[in-house]
Image (cartoon, rainbow, N blue to C red):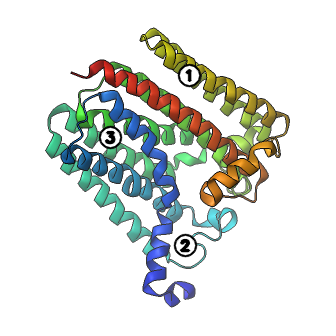
Amino acid sequence: MAVSAKLGFIDKVRAHLELLDPVTWLSVFPCLAAGVMSSGAMKGTVHDYFLLLAIFMMYGPLGTGFSQSVNDVFDLELDRVNEPSRPIPSGRLSEKEGLLNSIIVLLLAAGLGVLLWLHIGGTRGLIILAGILSALFVAYIYSAPPLKLKKNILTSAPAVGFSYGFVTFLSANALFAEIRPEALWLAGLNFFMAVALIILNDFKSAEGDKEGGLKSLTVMIGAKNTFLASFVIIDMVFGVMAYLAFTWGFIMPSFFVLIGLALNLVIQVKLLRDPKGGLSFVTGAVEDGFGNAIGKSDVQEHNTFLRFQVINNILFLISNLLVAGMVGTKYMP
C-alpha cells in the first residue's frame, strides 16, 4: 500500500496497463482473423475495418484484459508466491484499485458488445453479444469463488478454450456473414488448441498451485506427462484440420497442415526426451527473433514451453488462416 501511494500518475497508469497484461491481447487475434476470413464477406472499406478494430478491442484489450485483471484480484495470495512482481502483490496497485480496473474494462467490453449487436442486428448481432457476455462471465467464474474454475484443470482448460478460441472465432465470422458450417468445425479446433496450450502454461505456477490446492495437470501427473497430454491434443487438432481440409476439397492446404504436424512431431519428440532442455537447439533462434516478447520464466519447463509455443503457434497460425481463407473463398460472391 505504501508503494502504491508513492507512485506518480504515469507509473500508476503503467501499473494498470500491466494488470491487463497486453502480451495476452494478441492471443485472440489469430482466431478473430481466421473467423473473419472464413466468412468470405469482409470488404476493404473503412466501415469494415472499423468493425474489425472494434471486435479486436472488445475481445483483446477489454475482454482478455478483464480476464487478466480479475484473475489478479482474486489470486493475490497465489501471486505472492508465483508472480510477486505483478502490480497488486508488489504494492504498485491496491486491491481496491485492481478491482476498479476490472470493473471498468468489464463495462467497456460489454458496452462495445451491445453497440455491435445494435449495429449488426439479427441473429448475427445476437451471436456477437452472446459471445462477449459469455466470455466475460466465464472469465469471472474462472477466477472468482465459489466456482473458481481454475482450481481444477478439468474446468479451467475448457473455460480458456471457450473464451479464447471458440466464441472469438464465431463472433468474427458473424461480424460479416451468417455462421458458415465449416466455421463451427474450425472454431472447435481453435478451442482444443487453446486447451492444449493452457495446460502447458500452468508450468509457471506449479509451486503456488500445489501450495494453494489447485489441481493443475502438472501438479497431478508431473511435467513430462503434462507435455505428453498436451501434445496429443495439439497433434489431434492438426490431424483433424488436415482431414477436414481434404474432405472440403482443399487438397494443397491439407498437405501444408500435415507438414506442420510433421514438424511439430519432430520438436515434440526432442522435448519429451528432455522436458527441461529439449529445445536448446532452437533457443537461440527463437530468442534472437522474438527477444523478450515471448517472456521468461524461472521454471525451466515453462521456459521450454514458451519456446515451443512460438514454433507451434506459427505452424498453427499458418494452417488456421490458410484453411479459413479457403473456406472464405468458397462463399465469396
The residue pinned by badge 1 equals 256
Q: Which mark is residue 88?
A: 2
Front disc: 1 or 3: 1
Q: Which mark is residue 31?
A: none
Q: Which residue is found at the position 50% from the left and 77% from the top?
A: 93
Name the kind of residue labelled 1 in the image: Phe
Point out the tag, 2 or 3, that comes first from the N-terminus.
Answer: 2
Q: Is residue 283 above or below residue 246?
A: below
Q: Nearer the viewer, residue 297 or 78?
A: 297
Occupied quadrant, residue 200: top right
Point out the tag, 1 or 3, that comes first from the N-terminus.
Answer: 3
Contact, mark 1 vs mark 3 (Cβ under 8 Å): no
Name the kind of residue labelled 2 in the image: Ile
Q: Is residue 64 above or below residue 243?
A: below
Percent from the top left, x then y, of residue 129?
26, 43
Q: Which residue is found at the position 58% from the left and 39% from the top?
A: 313
* SS assignment at label 2: loop
Percent from the top left, x then y, of residue 205?
68, 54
* SS assignment at label 1: helix
Percent from the top left, x then y, of residue 43?
23, 36
